[in-house]
Image (cartoon, rainbow, N blue to C red):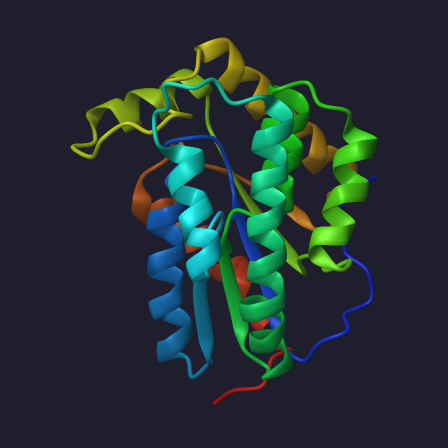
């Protein structure tokens, strides 16, 4: 099973935020960061693909509308290359300093989007991901769940430009959502499913309650 939480090998806490497009995870990660800082924790907020100059450059390629079709394999390998840079240069150093790392997407997104959505071989993805992460697994994953059509409607209502993934079919995004929920069923201790169809305030209250219990194990600044 991909990405089971194992014995922690760092002093910090690694929390990932997952979900389909428009699920509100980015809003929630920003709110949670402020809550944790006020509580006295040292917090790093980062994202995937991204987090380093190289990884952000790869993000630009991945999300920009392209005239050249991108193969599913090329997409996955670019994401994993960005993750390798991110883990080595940002995430692991922060965990080693005892910080709480809040990451907007991580390996579960690869399994959901490139595995369930694109249909790539899951065993191959898991093996390649272990290389990219050097076996780093989240301590806690928050999965913000809502129907794909609702999430895409939220994205369309945003004033920002729609990226390449936003333009995929509802069928593709339905498969991604099923993938996330399947992963959650296989790893219920690590992945907490949160109803993202509720108000921002209701979701935030649940997120804070879950994370503050976990954060108690981390060193305060």
Nearest to the observer: residue 154 or residue 166: 166
| Relative horizontal placement of residue 211, taking residue 136 as reference (left or right) | left
Q: Residue furthest bottom?
A: 221
| Relative horizontal placement of residue 183, taking residue 14 as reference (left or right) | right
- Which residue is painted at 52% across and 87% down in the image? 220
Q: Is 99 drawn above or below residue 194 in the view shown?
A: below
Q: Is 59 drawn above or below residue 46 in the view shown?
A: above
| Relative horizontal placement of residue 93, taking residue 6 as reference (left or right) | left
Nearest to the observer: residue 68 or residue 152: 68
Instruction: Locate residue 30, reporting x and y percent.
Output: 34, 58
Instruction: Locate residue 109, reporting x and y percent.
Output: 58, 38
Nearest to the observer: residue 30 or residue 209: 30
| Relative horizontal placement of residue 132, taking residue 68 as reference (left or right) | right
- Which residue is painted at 43% across and 64% down in the image? 45
Q: Could you tell me which quadrant the N terminus lies in?
A: top right
Q: Is residue 108 visible?
A: yes
Instruction: Locate residue 75, reporting x and y percent.
Output: 56, 31
- Which residue is painted at 77% across and 24% down in the image? 121
Q: Is 67 drawn above or below residue 43 in the view shown?
A: above
- Which residue is painted at 63% across and 38% down in the image? 77
Q: How many marks?
A: 0
Q: Is residue 187 visible?
A: no
> For residue 196, which quarter of the picture?
top left
> For residue 168, which quarter of the picture?
top left
Q: Residue furthest left?
A: 159
Q: Is 94 drawn above or below residue 200 in the view shown?
A: below
Instruction: Locate residue 192, reporting x and y percent.
Output: 61, 46
């Amino acid at each position: 099973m991909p990405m089971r939480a194992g014995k922690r090998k760092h002093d910090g806490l690694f929390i990932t935020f997952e979900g389909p497009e428009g699920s509100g995870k980015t809003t929630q990660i920003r709110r949670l960061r402020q809550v944790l800082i006020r509580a006295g924790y040292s917090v790093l907020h980062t994202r995937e693909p991204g987090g380093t100059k190289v990884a952000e450059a790869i993000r630009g390629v991945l999300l920009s509308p392209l005239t050249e079709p991108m193969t599913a394999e090329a997409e996955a390998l670019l994401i994993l290359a960005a993750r390798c840079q991110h883990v080595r240069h940002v995430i692991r150093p922060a965990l080693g300093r005892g910080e709480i790392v809040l990451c907007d997407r991580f390996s579960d997104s690869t399994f959901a989007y490139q595995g369930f959505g694109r249909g790539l071989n899951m065993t191959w993805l898991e093996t390649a991901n272990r290389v990219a992460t050097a076996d780093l697994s989240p301590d806690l994953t928050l999965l913000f769940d809502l129907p794909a059509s609702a999430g895409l409607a939220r994205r369309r209502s945003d004033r920002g430009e729609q990226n390449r993934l936003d333009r995929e079919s509802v069928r593709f995004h339905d498969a991604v959502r099923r993938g996330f929920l399947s992963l959650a069923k296989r790893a219920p201790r690590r992945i907490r499913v949160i109803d993202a169809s509720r108000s921002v305030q209701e979701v935030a209250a649940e997120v804070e309650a879950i994370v503050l219990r976990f954060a108690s194990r981390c060193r305060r600044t």
